[in-house]
Image (cartoon, helix red, strand yellow):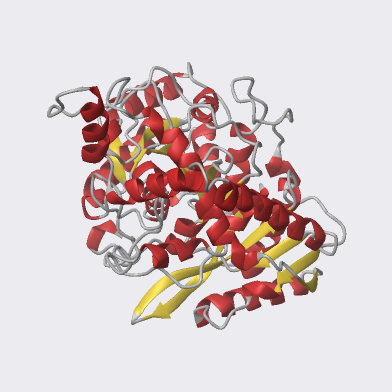
Amino acid sequence: MDPTELTLTDLRDAIAAGTIRAGDAIEAYLARIERVDGGLGCYREVHADRAWTRARDVDAGTLTGPLAGVPIALKDNLCTAWGYTACGSRMLEHYQSPFTATAVERLEAAGAVMLGKTNMDEFAMGSSTEASAFGPTVNPWDRERVPGGSSGGSAAAVAARLCAAALGSDTGGSIRQPAAYCGVVGFKPSYGRVSRWGLVAFASSLDQIGPMTRNVADAALLLGIIAGRDPQDSTCVDRPGEDYVSQLDQPMGELRIGVPRQYVRGGNHTAVQQAVERAGELLSEQGAQLTEVDLPHTDYGVPTYYLVATSEASSNLARYDGVHYGYRSEKAGDLLELYSRSRAEAFSDEVKRRIMLGTFALSSGYYDQYYARALKVRRLIRRDFDRAFEQCDVILAPTVTDPAFRLGEKVDDPLAMYLNDVYTANANLAGLPAIHVPTGLAECDGVKLPVGVQLMGQVFQEVRLLHTAMLYEKAAGQELPVPPLGGTDS
């Protein structure tokens, strides 16, 4: 039995039953990473020695828990007291955190084994994982295409069977969009459901940590472990974590599915639109009632997001000045030059662009015109969802407009890259939980690429959302195969 072929839950159960040793599971995954990842670029750093130590502790019975021995990957913006936390940037290339993120601590307390850090767009600012200072990650379904971003390394690693599951972060779609491109489940919890302590900030009112897995049950399992109150994060709500897995198959009564008219566009790829329509049919066959809902401020979501997010990024990234920690220029003659040179040399063009956009939006004379107005529109977007949820329990929509695009296709067109967030950013602005569920493969320019759908729920109604996602997953009745990586690597 190849451990890399098992889902997180199945591998957990096999290790607990003694049919697979934790050491054998780690050996299989590390060997596959060594064999496959050179052509994908999923991992920025592999912590093999530490993984082996924890696996031996599991096999010796000194490390136990509901995830004992299960190998998990971490996005490189999650702080760990081991290795480096670089955020895909030269600015933090050699940064060693003195502490570990709460979400990671909870996984470790459950016995999980952290395999390493996955590649990402620099400071989570991107939609393709091409904006990493350490080189791009490619899509395991077609190495000429992007895996999405900014959690592209995590999504590609899960799809390519280089970990049993991974954690990502989602500010405007950075879990769900790469999940869509790579054909995995990507779950963004409600804002405040999971502690952000130890997540390197991009936009503090939008960022949220979430699981990336092969199926809905695995996502529910991980969420139940990482969620819950954390006194170190004042934005984390005082709600205990729940056993989401045990509630997946519980009857939920009447289920009303809303389909936003604004998300059904002529610009959607045919395969994307067909996936949404087919999902609606399958859910209807399971007894759900479909209804059209109105989200009138949908088209304001992307501009609102890119004002709010860049403004918060401008503030959050001000700390990287070449003095306290991080990259320091060796060419500076005085303090002012040290600041300017360190930031100019270590930040990429995309990060600089977003810092400048945010600084402008917050500047004197423009604050009310841009940032304050964006906050008002954000409130209108949240109100749209509140009204829609008076008519439905869960909203069904596309996650992206098209399957994965080609490497380099949008690098020189920031606006086209930003429009990747058109169906995902509004859930972040409203603080809603949202999940991408793969539906199958579609022919695109002679290549078979993953497609799927997005489900959005009411704030803190993760149980209902996960239940609906599981209902759809079972109705669809298919799991995507391993991507055709070629030869013995498939």
The location of residue 159, given as percent across then percent down, is 41, 55
Residue 344 relative to residue 57: left or right: left
Residue sitting at x 80%, y 50% = 250
When asked about the image quadrant of residue 397, the answer is bottom right
Residue sitting at x 38%, y 51% = 161
The location of residue 140, given as percent across then percent down, is 33, 60
The location of residue 156, given as percent across then percent down, is 38, 54
Image quadrant in which the C terminus is located: bottom left
The answer to whether any part of residue 105 appears in the image is yes
Residue 439 relative to residue 489: left or right: right
Residue sitting at x 42%, y 28% = 79
When asked about the image quadrant of residue 229, the answer is top right
The location of residue 47, given as percent across then percent down, is 30, 30
When asked about the image quadrant of residue 290, the answer is bottom right
The single residue placed furthest to the left in the displayed view is 331
Is 438 or 384 nearer to us in this picture? 384
Above/below status of 195 relative to 419: above
Residue 393 relative to residue 141: left or right: right
Is 107 or 305 nearer to us in this picture? 305
The single residue placed furthest to the front in the displayed view is 365
Is 282 or 408 nearer to us in this picture? 408
Residue sitting at x 46%, y 35% = 315
